[in-house]
Amino acid sequence: MTSSAKSILDIPYTSSFPVSALLPSSGQYTQVLDMMRFYSSSTYNPADVAQIRALINAIPGEISRYDNQLASRGRFSEVVVADRATLQNVLDRCKSAITSPIRKLPTEVLLLIFRECRLAADESCDHVLEEDRDRATLKAYRRLAGGDLANIAQVCHQWNMLVDSDPLLWSSITMDMRSWETQGEIEDVPGWLVQAWMLLHHALKRGGGLPVDVEAVVPRCHPLPVFALAHSSARWRSANIHIDPVMSTCLEAVHHHLPLLEKLHLRFIRENVREGLKDITKFFSDAPQLKELAYCGPINVLQHLPMEQLRRFSCSMLVPADVLPWTSLLPRLSDGVVHTHLNVAAFSDDDEPLQLSLVESSLHELSITATNPTGSGTGQLSQRVLGGILEALKLPSLVH
């Protein structure tokens, strides 16, 4: 290395190229950051605004001076490059604090954007099981914390206050407990429990008294968060519940406390565990506004539900034991829509013909889909099963 090259690298600044007087001290840099974090542009101190506007006007000239100096040197000092980057960073921060267009948006517009972000980010719990346990656990916490709202709230103090104070942003709650499923004895107070309960408590509190849409996956786990969610049932507008029957008592608090419930989607994690199934459906028997029911499980436990008031009823994966209870429900459904999926794999060519009594219903629309989860064809078996069902139905009001 030549002596001239060495001097350029070791002595970044000279009398002809002095260090910039606009490079901020740590205190000045913190002042700009504080303005971005804690204040909206309408509450800035006028003196601070004037100082930052002066920096916005002056720093581009300094950056050009650094660029010219760097371009004139074949090799340049890392100190000069770092200082040039600092100037650019300060300029960007100052512009963001004062002139960024998003800081000029009215509060009402910001809230509309936040609500759209929340709707776009909402995702079903059905896609979580493909991930490893740690990632699934983080996602479960994130959903309880409001999803993308947690990131939005960290941008600045104003956004944090908006997220925290707008109940409409908290009109849906997703609680996926699969990451904390237990097989044996349930721990007294596991470490995750306090955090999950607090996140749920804050989400419910932020929603105020507004109706809420609930999605919950409840395997065998500690019941405390489920109890807390159930005790908010007076606000439920819709509920998507996927539950292990052994956890049925956790939902007892919803009984007679569902004044707003319009839509119910009910599935069971272990359908072969019969104990608790009737209790769960019975807990939803008093829901005066219920209009839509989606169900996957044994049909014979639905007799407690207010079928007469339903406008839409769908059920999935019916097996031979479900056909008779299903047809017996149809007379209770008036002027409604029924969608049904038959699990053809559960039927056999060796089965006795379906012994169904003739039933009459005033349904307006009926669809019956025969599916085979094994992937093999349905063919004549489907025709025989469907034919036996249709022969037992009298539907004088049917349109579709």
Image: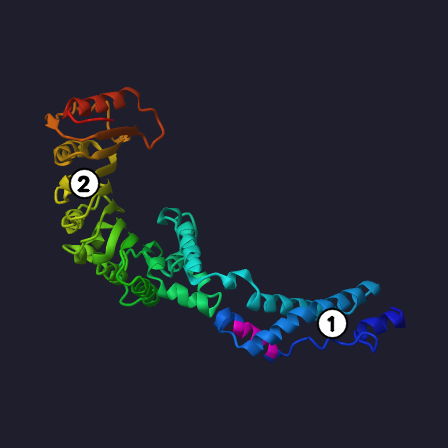
Give coordinates of residue 33: x percent, y percent: 55, 72
Q: Residue at x 87, y 68 (%)?
A: 1
Tags 2 and 1 touching, CB below 8 Å: no
- Estimate the spatial distance between the alpha carbons at disc 2 and disc 1, rounded to whole Å: 73 Å
Residue 195's disc is: none
Question: In this orientation, which residue lies closer to the viewer: 314 or 49?
Answer: 49
Tell me the element at label 2.
loop
Marking on residue 79: 1
Direction from residue 1 to residue 275 in the image, left or right: left
Which percent across, then down, holds residue 61? 73, 68
Which kind of residue does numbered mark 1 sit on? Val
Q: Which residue occupies 41% across, 68% down?
A: 161
Q: Main secondary structure of the magenta part?
A: helix
Residue 32 in magenta?
A: yes
Q: Is the residue 107 above or below the residue 350 in the image? A: below
Q: Where in the figure is residue 179, as x and y percent of width and height? A: 36, 56
Rendered view: 348 above or below 222: above
Mark 2 or 1 closer to N-term? 1
Question: Within the image, what quadrant is residue 81 found in?
Answer: bottom right
Which residue is under mark 2? 310
* Residue 155, horizontal then vertical, whole percent: 49, 65
**Image quadrant in which the C terminus is located:** top left
Q: Which residues are magenta?
A: 28-35
Q: What kind of residue is marked 2?
A: Leu
Colour style of the rendered protein structure: rainbow
Please say whether residue 268 is one of the residues in the magenta stretch. Answer: no
